Amino acid sequence: MHGVVVSTERLTPSMVRVVLGGEGLAGFDPSGGTDAYVNLAIPPAGAPYGPVFDPAVVREEQPKELQPARRRYTVRAWDPAAGTHGELVLDFVVHGDSGAAGPWAAAAQPGDVLVFQGPGAGYTPNPGADWHLLVGDESAVPAIAASLEVLPAGARAFVRLLCDGPEHELALPAPAGVDLVWLHRAGAEAPADLLADAVAALDLPAGRGHAFVHGEADEVRALRRHLLGDRGLTRADMSCSPYWRRTMTDEDWRAVKRDFVAAMESDVA
Ligand SMILES: Cc1cc2nc3c(=O)[nH]c(=O)nc-3n(C[C@H](O)[C@H](O)[C@H](O)COP(=O)(O)OP(=O)(O)OC[C@H]3O[C@@H](n4cnc5c(N)ncnc54)[C@H](O)[C@@H]3O)c2cc1C
């Protein structure tokens, strides 16, 4: 599938929204979960194919150095009634000049083409839960925002989000009464511990909780250990995904992710 950039918007100094439209979105259906994601295929500069291409064909025909970078991004919103074949909204963290996806989003212009596969999904807030916990850094904000949109009025939810500073916060569509706090890395002595420490300090209610913990790998691991080991959540009541890892490109991360997840799961089985 592919989308054509309809518009872009700088939501914060480190977050760019890209709205995609066009006939390449025909049949797109991300209704499987509020963390639905697509697998982008971003060609290197000067690639002798595209702008629309079939990633499976390129995988067969092109040498390694001409393969597109593969990156996963969350469906922040999907409006099937907008445009000719619907509009897909993706929110990208822009984290400096390195990488494939962040720089692509920072430079995206109307008319640019983005090829992708998917969607996949794994989580929707369980309507049977007594309370919800949603935790993550900026990369998880699109999924957390989409999840907050489906929470019914009066739902009990605790949200802890990590960003660089106040100017990086986004207004999120949380139902009234949701306990939502942004934590700031800037000035913190141990930024990587902020999320786990904030969750450890929460006075969580009795009853069945349902947690969504996605984002930077080491931060997710610490949160998982705490929630399963100290709080007694069950694996079935927690969606836990290390999206990316500090100091690693996504290629480097994917090469070690299986071992990391196995080690993480052996922390608390
Ligand atoms: C299922 C899934 C859904 C995701 N949804 C989103 C989403 O909606 N929005 C989003 O922004 N990200 C999302 N991510 C994370 C995103 O795929 C990674 O951050 C990815 O590594 C970014 O690719 P890149 O090409 O920009 O940088 P890379 O080439 O992968 O990395 C270059 C450098 O930047 C660092 N880096 C990568 N990501 C970040 C970051 N978020 N903050 C600071 N430094 C970083 C790396 O450690 C590396 O040093 C998702 C990941 C998964 C698995």
Image (cartoon, rainbow, N blue to C red):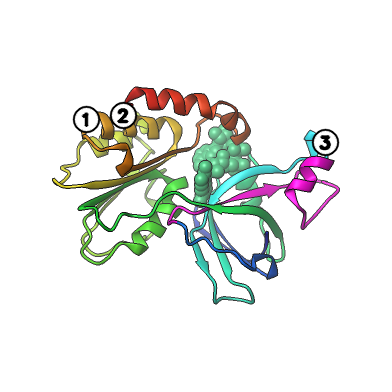
Q: Can see residue 161?
A: no
Q: Residues within 10 Å of mark 2 (few under 14, many from 20)?
A: some
* Horizontal arrangement in the rendering, residue 8 relative to residue 233 (left or right): right
Q: Position of residue 31 (x, y in %)?
A: 48, 62
Q: Judging from the image, what secondary structure is the residue with disc 1 in? A: helix
The residue type indicated by label 3 comes to: Pro
- Give percent across and percent down for residue 71: 61, 44
Q: Which mark is residue 63?
A: 3
Q: Specify the segment rendered in magenta.
A: 33-61
Q: Is residue 51 magenta?
A: yes
Quadrant where the image shows the N terminus: bottom right
The CB of the residue at mark 3 lies under 8 Å from ligand 1: no
Rounded to the nearest angstrom, the CA distance separating label 3 from label 2 is 41 Å
Q: CA distance from mark 3 to mark 1?
A: 49 Å
- What is the three-letter code of the residue carrying label 2? Arg
Can you tell which mark lies on residue 136? Answer: none
Task: Report which residue position mark 1 lands on.
Answer: 230
